[in-house]
Every structure is written in structure tokens, then in C-alpha cells.
Amino acid sequence: MADDARVICQSSVLEEGGKGFRFNVDWQGRKTPAFVIRYQGKAHAFLNQCGHVPVELDWQEGEFFDAEQVYLVCATHGALYDPAKGTCISGRCNGRGLTTLPVEEINNQIRLLKHRLMP
């Protein structure tokens, strides 16, 4: 575990392709919304900002996946993103993907690396 890691949530909060967990990070000196989801057995975290314009993705709090639980979807624009990498699959994001955040899963906890969590 890295010395600068901070706990985001317990591993049990995330279900495969299910509801994400929202949290805040200090990003470029500002409190910025972020989220973590579980996809293909791993935790993946991103800033909660569409690649098209900086609006939050979730269509209801913590709901980031499309109906088939295959892609992350922007509720405002309908852009689709790869849940493992955050790359734009289709939509108005014009190739701009999500900003990924480094996470690790250790001792049943999801931990954010290299960024300071905000309350």
C-alpha cells in the first residue's frame, strides 16, 4: 500500500456492474466530484465529469452504467465510456475520455492513491 493512499470505501460497497460510490477529490486545487465502480472484478475510479463538458455522469446518484451494465453513460449527452479505461466509445465526447484516478484494493478497502480526499 502506498503511504499517500486514502480509503474511499469498503470493497463490499461495490458490486460488479452495479451502483458506483461517489466521493470528492482535491483536483487542481478544487473540490471535484469523483466515483469508483467495479468492472471485470476490479475497482476503477474517475472524475465525475463527462469528456464533452464537465457535467456529472450519473443519471441517479451513483448510477453510472447503461441499462445493459456494459458501458458508463453520461446522463446529459448519452456518451458511452469504457468502464475499465474511461475511453470514449461513442457520443459527443469526440474522443475525450474520462479522467482516471489511481486506486488499489487492499484488505477489503478501496484506496485512492496520489490524491487528497475532500470531505
Image (tube, helix red, strand yellow):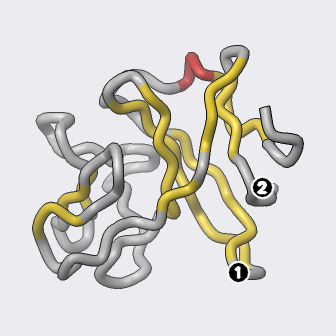
Q: Position of residue 65 (x, y in %)?
A: 27, 43
Residue 114 placement: quadrant = bottom right
* Residue drawn at (35%, 30%) of the image: 18
Q: Position of residue 111 (x, y in %)?
A: 70, 37
Distance (Cα) linking label 2 and label 1: 12 Å
Q: Position of residue 76 (x, y in %)?
A: 25, 71
Secondary structure of the residue carrying tag 2 is strand
For label 2, the crowd category at 10 Å Cα-Cα, with few meaning under 14, some 14 to 19 and many 20 or more, is some
In this rendering, position of residue 82 left or right of residue 54: left
What residue did someone put label 1 on?
A: 28
Identify the secondary structure beneath mark 1: loop
Asked whether 68 or 43 is in front, the reply is: 43
Indicate which disc, 2 or 1, sits on the residue closer to the N terminus: 1
Q: Quadrant of residue 112?
A: top right
Tell whether 26 sits left or right of 78: right
User: Taking 66 as reference, is 91 above or below it?
Assistant: below
- Residue for point 51% across, 48% down: 45
Observer-nearest residue: 44 or 10?
A: 44
* In the rendered image, the vertical position of residue 101 relative to residue 67, given as above or below: below
Amino acid at the residue labelled 1: Gln
Task: Please tell me which residue lies in front, 75 or 1.
Answer: 1
Q: Name the image quarter holding the C terminus.
A: bottom right
Residue 105 location, quadrant: top right
Q: Residue at x 16, y 79 (%)?
A: 92
Is 77 situated above or below 69? below
On residue 50, the disc is none
In the image, residue 36 lies at what x, y percent?
51, 43
- Which residue is at a point 35% across and 32% down the rendered structure image? 39
| Residue identifier under label 2 | 117
- Where 95 falls versus 59 (above or below)? below
Q: Amino acid at mark 2?
A: Leu
- Quarter occupied by the N terminus: top right
